[in-house]
Amino acid sequence: MKTISIIKGDITQIAVAAIVNAANTSLLGGGGVDGAIHRRGGAEILADCQKIRAKQGGCKVGEAVVTTAGHLPAQYVIHTVGPTWVDGQHNEINLLENAYRNSFRLAESLELKSIAFPNISTGIYHFPKQLAAEIALKTIQAELNQGHWVQEVTFVCFDDENFNIYQLLKADF
């Protein structure tokens, strides 16, 4: 049975096949979830990111790439770049959908059973949290219905505000 769960916690502590990193286009680490994943995962993640940069120059907004998980309890880290919120008129919604969709599809292509997502773009990229949660749940529910491999999706909320938003919205899915 395929499931979506919502927890409050630290994504770097989650034992799943893949965790998703809300990365920046450089893939070199940053603040928030990105910095925490790079710090806790260790040098192996950065080394893989540097190989990706050498091959394709980074990761575009809405796209996704995969690396080892280093010292994390997951097997892989799927790095995706969410959009920076401007005003809702700069393709932000479509780009955020793509970030979730492409991350999920990368997990499917690797035949993974479980994946954990952070709240992409809701930190320093200022995407409205309610709208971001609606997009995340809608996009992942659709992908889960069509997918074959992924059986378990976990949304890992770092703060109470996102956790409460996701809990309320999940009842509609």
Image (spheres, rainbow, N blue to C red):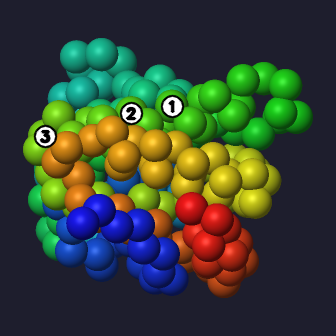
Residue type marked 1: Asn
The residue wearing badge 3 is 110
Horizontally, is 140 left or right of 58 in the view?
right
Residue type marked 3: Leu
Residue type marked 2: Asn
Q: Which element type, helix, strand or loop, lies under badge 3?
A: loop
Q: Residue furthest top?
A: 56
Would you place residue 147 above or below residue 8 in this image?
Answer: above
Picture quadrant where residue 69 is located:
bottom left
Q: Are marks 2 and 1 in contact (CB under 8 Å)?
A: yes
Residue 144, position as x, y percentages in the image: 36, 49
Tell me the residue at 69%/34% (across/down).
93
The residue wearing badge 2 is 102
Q: Is residue 170 visible?
A: yes
Mark-to-mark CA distance, 3 and 2: 12 Å
Which numbered disc flags the more N-terminal residue, 3 or 2? 2
Residue 31, position as x, y percentages in the image: 54, 58
Q: Residues within 10 Å of mark 3 (few under 14, many from 20)?
A: some
Q: Residues within 10 Å of mark 2 (few under 14, many from 20)?
A: many
Mark-to-mark CA distance, 2 and 1: 6 Å
Mark-to-mark CA distance, 3 and 1: 18 Å
Horizontally, is 28 left or right of 82 in the view?
left
Tell me the residue at 76%/39% (across/down).
85
